[in-house]
Image (tube, grey):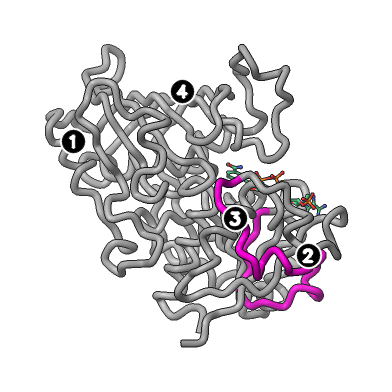
Amino acid sequence: MNKIPVAILGATGLVGQRFITLLANHPWFEIAELAASDNSVGKKYGAAAKWQLPFEIPARLAQMSVLPCDPHAVQAPLVFSALPTDIAGALEVEFAKRGAIVSSNASPHRMGADVPLVIPEVNPDHLALACVQRKKFNSKGFILCNGNCTTIHLVLALAPLHQRFGLKKALVTSMQALSGAGYPGVASLDIIDNVVPYIGGEEDKVEQEPRKFLGKLNGETIELSDIRISAHCNRVATRDGHMETVSVEFETKPQLEDVIAAFDEFRGLPQELALPLAPARPTVYRREPDRPQLKLDRDAEKGMATIIGRLRECAVLDYKFVLLGHNTLRGAAGATVLNAELLYAQGELG
Ligand SMILES: NC(=O)c1ccc[n+]([C@@H]2O[C@H](COP(=O)([O-])OP(=O)(O)OC[C@H]3O[C@@H](n4cnc5c(N)ncnc54)[C@H](OP(=O)(O)O)[C@@H]3O)[C@@H](O)[C@H]2O)c1
């Protein structure tokens, strides 16, 4: 079988490194090009990347020369973007105009009216927006986004509840790992013995993106869900995995065991289609009183699931619970690859 050649933009960064490990032996995609900043261009990938993962860089990729993030230098028809926010907006449009399908992990286009913002288990139908961009760009290219790393796990937990019972409100407080800030990220003296109660732009993303994920496709637009979310986002001195404490209010309060059943039974198109990176269970409910825990649970289901626990009555809203998700896997590169797998399975990649 001929694999689809793919490029990684921002390949040397923390998310880029996760792309490398997820795509190195992928059954449908083959890494053909790696691109990064001018600091890395022309170097061998193995020398340019400050490798952070406990696996060797695959030998073929370590020897590859790093290209500039330029749509004329990078030719692959499918491009995975882990570009920094400040340059992703304009560059991703250039790639889409030259005909590339851009599966992006960056934030600038997520809330764009004609941009599908997709979690394949939750809103695969939103992919229909691609045709609006294709018309606009007069190209076969378009941009497809995954959500913010905290938002994806929140939405994976809220979606089964919203689908079954209807949700009105959620209050969420996050404890977010250092790898969420990229490499080298937060200075060590700013975070050792500390919790920083501010992550620029994060609370707005966590409050707004779920309204699009949980919104309804109506022709060529998305009607945003009117769920109201209030978020506090904190940086904590952990390495990988974002933990969130969540309180929710329903349209009609269900029984506690029915909420747990909704988490236990939640499945979607990735499981039905057996996409290569799909977790068997996208939401895993742990019944022990002290789970989920970062070290024990973040890698469950290959880092592609949201682990939930401690569901109990809330004195202010209806119920409260804890969730945990891997931020650079399901919260970033894993989400971007799963979106591309959905495109492939639906015949969008030719
Ligand atoms: N880390 C996470 O958990 C996470 C989760 C969700 C979303 N994201 C988003 O994913 C993107 C990447 O995050 P990251 O954590 O991987 O960041 P990172 O570790 O700082 O990596 C940034 C990457 O972008 C490249 N780059 C920097 N400036 C560039 C330029 N002017 N032109 C071309 N390439 C440039 C870097 O190349 P050099 O090595 O050559 O400098 C590197 O490959 C960001 O938009 C971030 O917000 C991250």
Dot 4 corresponds to which residue? 173
Judge whether residue 79 is colored magenta: yes
Above or below residue 19? Residue 13 is: above
Mark 4 or mark 3: whose residue is earlier in sequence: 3
Whether tag 1 and tag 2 are in contact, CB under 8 A, the answer is no
Chief SS of the magenta region: loop
Query: What number is the disc on residue 260?
Result: 1
Whether tag 4 and tag 1 are in contact, CB under 8 A, the answer is no
Looking at the rendered structure, the kind of residue marked 4 is Thr
Query: What number is the disc on residue 66?
Result: 2
Observer-nearest of 52 and 240 = 52
Mark 2 or mark 4: whose residue is earlier in sequence: 2
| Of marks 1 and 3, the one in the foreground | 3
Percent position of residue 16, x then y: 64, 54
Percent position of residue 324, x then y: 40, 34
- Residue sitting at 75 percent across and 63 percent down? 35
Could you tell me which secondary element the residue under label 3 belongs to? loop
Above or below residue 4? Residue 259 is: above
